[in-house]
Image (cartoon, rainbow, N blue to C red):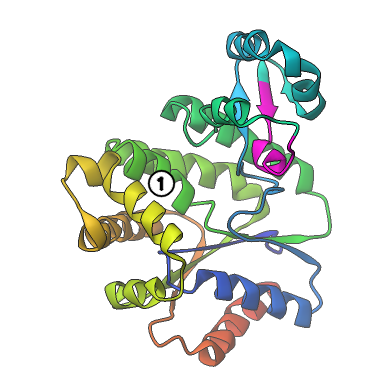
Amino acid sequence: MRTKLILVEGLPSSGKSTIAEITDEILSKIGIERKLFKEGNLDHPADYDGVACFNHKEYNELIAKYNKYSQLIQKDLIQKGNDYFLPYAKLLNDTSYPSELINDITKYDIYELSLDRHIDLILKKWEHFVHSVIHDKFTYIFECCFMQNPITVSMLRDNSPKEKTINYIKRLAKIIEPLNPILLYVNQKDFEMSFKKVLNERPESWLKGFIDYYTNRGFGKENEMNGIEGTIEVLRARKKLELEIFYLLKMDKWIIDNSSYDFNNTKDELMNIITKHYNK
């Protein structure tokens, strides 16, 4: 079976967004129908971005507190069993929602829930995705949601035991087996240089939020990391864990060396990888 899922992973500033785009171009060139979902896509079919989830009790408490806005909330609500999903990121420009209500909703962002509940919701989302696309005609390209997002919550946010993070991603890998996935890990030999390079290309607000997440939560906080240098040390630990997991996974996988940012050579390398796979 041809692959129906190509996963692009790597540290921030590694060039994974560009690699995902090049992969999309290559599939188009060889006549493969595909769908690309980059980081931050609010309509991601296997992940949640800007979505809050409430259990029955939490939802009733929200409605009781904001009874005046109950019809507005229910209009955008998606119920699945005892779970109530609210895609709040899509509502941020809707002035009908007062800021206090939005703030209370964001407390239940799926990436802010307890780790076990978060994992349960994410695994169900991936299972639904696999079931829904297994027989369709598309190959899906996902940037960063397979390794980066689980590591962000389990390691960076909670500093969970390494084994829990590894097990989480192994469970994801098992779920996607029917799609015959390919994993592309975009590597920078000198990731410190590449990260500092991108600092000049990103707005100050991005940098502040990034450093805050990496140093004031979980792994960074417990290891007393601070500032840009502390953030780089957290990234170093993250990369070590990502590569450990990469080599443990039993799937078609490749490390793409993007140290020189020579995307022409990288494009040739990707073309060889992808065409060999589709010519199997």
Question: Does 199 lie within the magenta span?
Answer: no
Closer to the camera in the image, 66 or 178 = 66
Q: Residue at x 77, y 48 (%)?
A: 133
Query: Looking at the image, can residue 143 be seen?
Result: yes
Give SS at disc 1: helix
Q: Position of residue 22 (x, y in %)?
A: 63, 78
Q: Which residue is drawn at 74% across and 39% down?
A: 94
Q: Position of residue 79 (x, y in %)?
A: 74, 22
Vertical relation: 24 (above or below) 1 = below
**Quadrant showing the C terminus:** bottom right
Q: Is residue 247 left or right of residue 21?
A: left
- Mark 1, residue position: 152
- Quadrant of res 197: bottom left
What span is in magenta?
84-95
Closer to the camera in the image, 242 or 232 = 232
For disc 1, the neighbor class at 10 Å (few under 14, some 14 to 19, many from 20) is many
Closer to the camera in the image, 189 or 157 = 157
Q: Which residue is drawn at 26% across and 55% down?
A: 234
For badge 1, the amino acid type reads Thr
Vertical relation: 234 (above or below) 93 = below
Q: Residue at x 71, y 79 (%)?
A: 25
- Quadrant of res 162: top left
Vertical relation: 139 (above or below) 108 = below
Query: Looking at the image, can residue 248 be seen?
Result: no
Q: Where is residue 244 in the image (x, y as percent from the top left)?
A: 31, 56
Q: In this view, does 216 lie to the left or right of 132?
A: left
Question: Does 86 lie within the magenta span?
Answer: yes
